[in-house]
Image (cartoon, rainbow, N blue to C red):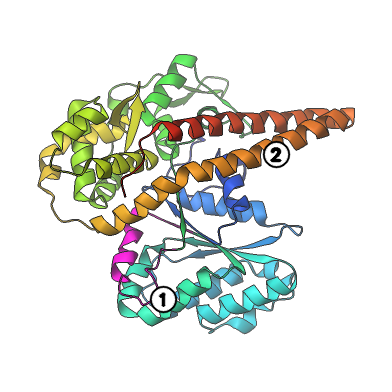
Amino acid sequence: MRIPYIVGRWVNGSRHYGRQRLFDYLLDTPDTATWIVGARRMGKTSLLRQLEMLTDSADSELVPLFWDMQGCESSQALSDELFLALEDASSRFSALGIAVAEWEGLDALLILRRLARILHSRGQRLLLLIDEAEVLIQIARNEAAWLARLRRSLQDPALKTMLASTKLLIQLNAVTAEWPTSPFLFGFNMVNLWSLDPDSAVALVEQRQAPRHVHASRAVLEEILLHTHRHPYLIQFLCQRLYSEDSGGQGFLRAPTDEDLDPDHLLAGFFLIDFQQMTRLERRLLLLVGQHTLTTEAELLADLADADPQRIRTYLWGMEKLGHLRRIYDQLAVGNEYLRRWLLANRSQLEQMDEALVDEESFAQILQIGYTREPASYQVELERLEHQHRQLQERLALCQPDQRVAVASELNRLGQQLDQVRRDVAQTRQRLPLAH
């Protein structure tokens, strides 16, 4: 029996589900530099790899380069890794007249500058996709001048940079706070990576993009989505436990048992890392919500009377965006059932954790920027989608009969995105403005 669900490694192509709205936004945004923030196992690498695949075509204005920084402890190591990334994509760049082999031994800053110039002369831009960017924190401590020059390169309009990491990267701002310009992440547009939309989550459960689909009853589907809150890793983690095949080889999912909802040691390790990367106030909020099971914002404000109410509201927004919390009937709950059980099982130890890896003030500042920018970002996205929707409606009215099915399908997909963005716009208009 071959289980179709993939747990623990990145995917792209037909194995990648959802995120279409985010892909459209990331490729369309005028921002030169974007910081994609996600919790552990949220699919950051898969997102970057899918972006690489989507833009790897001869007619694309963007030319992708995936740069994995994991394990690099110096500028020399980063430069070596960037050259290896170029070698891995050598066919892509040789087609543009770039002799990759001649660039061996060059500093990463020089490589990026040369790539940007060559592509700009062809009317194209380098799409730099950076993974595991947390290594830059240590490099900031040891090679501040080099990192400052890297930051200038990453925010050069001749490039389009997308940098993915956990929220731990906010330490860069604390380490570089004394720079004469501004801290490292200032100038990066922050985007949160969280749950799949409901339709994409169901498609993942049923493996609709695979040669053979998996059967799940409506009741089982609802349980899976409820317990995982559409977290892509948790969906596949749970489905892997539930998967069986009948005598004819048809895959199906049984109903989850109580035992299926217990986290294993690997999942517990990911939760611990996420918890360690929270500020002290975020930890208090998460533990309080876990203690109450369901609670309201007003109850949390009363329980944490010693904390600033506006900061609590901002943190609650950020914790929802990262999936640590969710709303059920306008009440707050822990983000998913696995996390809830882990919190309950380890509550006494977690309450004793006092050391914070993330600087409270740096994180609050970045989070407030994201909080206040979100309504305007949604409005821009809404206008863009409405324009595309009108264009598709006009195209549908004029297209040939053999094209109508494909255009109508795209129009339906775009309509679903529009409905979600309109809901997001309405929700942001309801919340209280931040105090300044």
Image coordinates of residue 203 in percent, x first then y, are 56, 29
Q: Which residue is mark 2?
A: 387
Image coordinates of residue 246 in percent, x first then y, are 52, 20
Q: Which residue is mark 1?
A: 147
Image coordinates of residue 405 in percent, x first then y, are 79, 28
Q: Residues within 10 Å of mark 1 (few under 14, many from 20)?
A: many
Inspect this view and state whether residue 208 appears.
Answer: no
Q: Secondary structure at mark 2?
A: helix
Q: Is residue 297 left or right of residue 12?
A: left
Residue span colored magenta: 163-186
Q: Is residue 291 left or right of residue 73?
A: left
Which residue is pictured at 68% across the width and 28% down the height? 412
Counting residues from the N terminus, which is met first, the one under dot 1 or under dot 2? 1
Q: Secondary structure at mark 1?
A: helix
- Residue 175 lies within the magenta run: yes
Above-or-below relation of 155 to 284? below
Q: Is residue 314 left or right of residue 309?
A: right
Which residue is pictured at 42% across the width and 26% down the height? 225
Towards the viewer: 205 or 113: 113
Above-or-below relation of 435 to 329? below
